[in-house]
Image (spheres, rainbow, N blue to C red):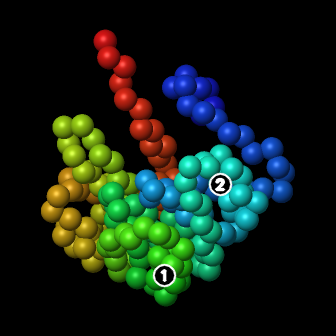
Amino acid sequence: MKEALTDLNMNIVEIADENATLDGGDVLFTGREFFVGLSKRTNQRGAEILADAFKDYAVSTVPVLEGLHLKSFCSMGGPGLIVIGSSDPAQKALKIMQQMSDHRYDKLTVPDDLAANCIYMNLPDKGHVLLHCTTDEFPESVKVFEKLKDHMLIPVSNLEKVKLDGALTCCSVLINKKKPDN
């Protein structure tokens, strides 16, 4: 991974503090700020190092009371749109995020927390694209996603990944990199 990012001329920040933990599943970048879930896999020191690395953005911490990490019940569904699960812990986390932020976000609440783990992309020639759970996994949540009429919706099965506590965002690294002009 380090070699691939270096080849793309990406800035790499390595965590040298052995007491710091930071799991990518606990980092939600909204495009305006970062929310960092404090969970079994991420601690306050990890959040502080992220804040040091991204000084131009606010970084707020959110306690993860249940679930593996923050993205177990929320993710970005588009610019300014947070997809959130309907459980009490997910809704409490959303309330904390709203209180800590200077920005206002729209929300899309899905009945199943794990279904809130989706991947948004803004692709040339495609526009708003959302990878989300399938109807086999979470049929009621898919009905909610289908209300996003301005998105190209692509269902992706997570049935195998979930057996290892994996989710859609666990298997992705999104890089906003423009192609060089030829």
Residue under circle 2? 51
Label at residue 2: none
Q: Up-down: is 164 above or below 85?
A: above
Q: Residue 40 occupies which quadrant of the picture?
A: bottom right
Question: Which amino acid, mark 2?
Answer: Ala
Q: Residue 9 occupies which quadrant of the picture?
A: top right
Query: Residue 63's spot in the image, x, y percent?
Result: 63, 75
Secondary structure of the residue carrying tag 1 is: helix
Q: Residue at x 33, y 57 (%)?
A: 79
Which residue is outermost to the left?
A: 149
Q: Up-down: is 58 above or below 145?
A: above
Query: Residue 73's spot in the image, x, y percent?
Result: 47, 71
Query: Residue 45's spot in the image, x, y percent?
Result: 76, 60
Residue under circle 1? 95
Question: Which amino acid, mark 1?
Answer: Lys
Q: Marks 2/1: CA distance?
A: 21 Å
Q: Let me know if residue 92 appears in the view.
A: yes
Secondary structure of the residue carrying tag 2 is: helix
Q: Up-down: is 89 above or below 121?
A: below
